[in-house]
Image (cartoon, rainbow, N blue to C red):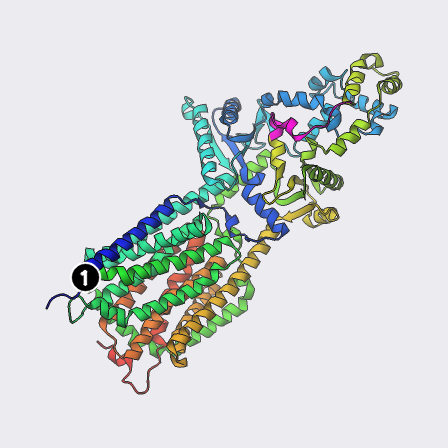
Amino acid sequence: MAAAGPSRSRRALVLLIWLASVLAGVAVISRTHFSADLSAFLPASPDPHQRVLIEQLQAGVASRTLLIGIEGGKDAAQRADVSRALGKAMRASGLFDQVQNGDNSDWAASGTFVFDHRYQLSPEVTPDRFTVEGLRNAIDDTLSLLGTPAGNIVKPLLERDPTGETQRIAEGLLPATSPRTDHGVWVSRDAPRAMLLAGTKAAGGDLDAQAQVIARVEAEFAKATQGLGASAPKLLMSGAPVFSVTSRDQIKREALHLALIGGIVMSGLLMLAFASPRALVIALLPVATGVVGGTAAVSLAFGHVHGMTMGFGSTLIGETVDYAIYYLIQARGARVPGTGWQRWRDLNWPTVRLGLLTSVCGFAALVFSGFPGLAQLGVFSIAGLIAAALATRHGLPMLAPDGASGMGMRHLMARAAGAIARTLPRLRWGFLALGFVAAGLVAWQGADLWRARLSSMSPIKQEMSDLDAKLREDIGASDASTLVVVQAADQQAVLRATEAASARLDALIEGGELLGFETVTRMLPSIAAQQLRIDSLPDAVTLRTRLAQATAGGPLPAARLEPFIAEVEKARTQKPVMRADLMDGPLGAVVNAMLYERPGGGWAALIALHPGPNFDAVRLAAALSTLPEVQVVDVGNELNSLYAHYLHEAFVQVMVGALAVVVLLGAYLRSGRRLLAVCEPLALAVLLTLGGMAALHVALGILHLVGLLLIVAVGSNYALFFDQLQETGSADEDTLASLMLANLTTVVSFGLIAISDIPALSAIGRVVAPGALLALLLSAAFMHRKKTATGVASKMAL
């Protein structure tokens, strides 16, 4: 009898459309930007505190700061030489706003600027400063420095700046916890290590640019140490740019690794099942289509793809391959060659389609999440599953009209599935008892079971975090756990509010709660503050009279201070220092880091804190609470609060998705008994998985919740097929073999993900691998026999 497969023209048209769709998806992906910062898992519509946090995570100074250590080597002198060479090369690269390592050679011009504008910049310039008593005390303080190491700086300026305003400004610009200096560069206090601090010009979220910066530092370090041989020091780097780039690269590498290993393992399983290389290739085509379709859809919807979403693609393999397995096995055995695809379309496709729709309903809840990262997972899953299902429904019949011809191990799988279906219904009450135990464990732990934090999603290893902490301690970096941000409509309003906040913080320094703080107003005071200082300066006649009285009987006669009088007189007519005046030197980079235009409009200033032994974020917030322009953000508490809100929203969305699945199944099955038979094993599989996690004291989080959703998505196919077998009363070998093979590939693929080095992927794998197996076993155990039928279990004897 002649074959009755699809016509040649139809086959060519379908395959051409399929190929064009995949190529279009690949073209979209080739232009896609991939990100890895965890800010994608922060709200898309944040409140004011959350907005401050997100701005800092994405583009704040902390997101652009590199901490660099030069460790080991021959001796401190060698490390200092390498530090100077590396710092010089980094400054010349044009990639950095600032590079600091204790080498002040580039600060000469800034020093001149500070000296020329010292009466506008010094916070000590007040009317009291220029009284007779004020002048006497200021001059005595300056003279006392002559016998100290600072005397070399003070002495040349003595006749022009006897009150020491330049010295006061310099002291204010030094961090409260500045690093130690040796051989002219910054060094660690307790390790053989030279230190550098650099701020990149590229935004923290621009990972491609940050990767180029890191590579440039490594290349310049290699040049600086060229020829040193075995005695050469080694380079250490940390900071948010390193974390972000490392996370992205690790996620990419792990995703490719998992896809490769998973592909090899599943290919082996499929070869054993089909005993046909051709069938193997065909089975993998819907998988590739699903991954391409999901990634392209996310790129089009969001403009970029988060690395976590890309890694999630490896989890999609476990479900999309099921569609190909169902078709290739269930379409075989047609009485008329070439019609197997039609039989599968009429008999089995409705079940597969319903399983697809239940998965789509479940993941649709994530699409409407207020968190872009979670919404991406939803879009990726839905688009990927639909693409894989359409490829199976329309594409595979064109390639294999009668499914896979080889038998392989399918007969053994069918017999195993039949044995499971005959045996497990007897264990139903045992499963229910385990379900009650699991429910008790989950209820006992309650909310404590869901105690994972946002940081648990990061792939950064502990040794990298430890290195970051060491370098921060060495360099005396400000505390990043508490943010003080001042916001206003324009620059001058921000500067005035920052000065008001600084006055409150000075009181906390006196109480020992702060060691110090850094603020932009030390380099760029508000125009109002500058004007008050200029107004404090007496005219030449008055100043000369007061100086004569202040220096009477002292070692510095007033006659030597005529240059000082001239400097003060000149300062009385100086214009205010503006931001543009600072942009050509190193001070400009510092100002840009601490005073910036906000993405949504307006301006903001960041105050960097150095907490003391008695620091309390609550008292800090109370001290600044009456300043409406100032916001205090406790980063740890804010992230925990965000994550709790994130988790609660995800729970609500998953519940809505589960309800939609139940409604869809009820509308399709139109039978309470059948609906119970399908939903009961899925609910129990989720409960037993949760109980197992509770027994192992696993801290559950968002990605575990997504894993539970995947159990329902994958398991619904098993439950629906067992329901179909029961309704038709025909437990054919191929259907049972397809269920067994689909479950095996799913469990193996998610089992591989469970041992991933990426915590987020590992979390999903550890939930779905056991959950999918339970879903198959429970679907067989909870079949409800029809009283009027022979009973499907007897027909599974095969």
Q: In this view, does 177 lie above or below 797?
A: above
- The answer to which image quadrant residue 569 occupies is top right
Residue furthest to the front? 9
Q: Position of residue 37 (x, y in %)?
A: 49, 46
Q: Which of 143 and 599 is in front in this view?
A: 599
Please name the amino acid that badge 1 sits on: Ser
Q: Is residue 578 magenta?
A: yes
| Region of the chain picked out in magenta, as a range | 573-588
In the picture, measured across the screen, residue 342 lies left or right of residue 246, that is left
- The answer to which image quadrant residue 721 occupies is bottom left
Residue at 58% across, 34% down: 474
Q: Where is residue 702 in the image (x, y as percent from the top left)?
A: 49, 58
Q: Is residue 735 above or below residue 601?
A: below
Q: Can residue 756 be seen in this view?
A: no
In the picture, measured across the screen, residue 697 lies left or right of residue 360, that is right
Query: The C terminus lies in which quarter of the figure?
Result: bottom left
Residue at 51% across, 32% down: 69
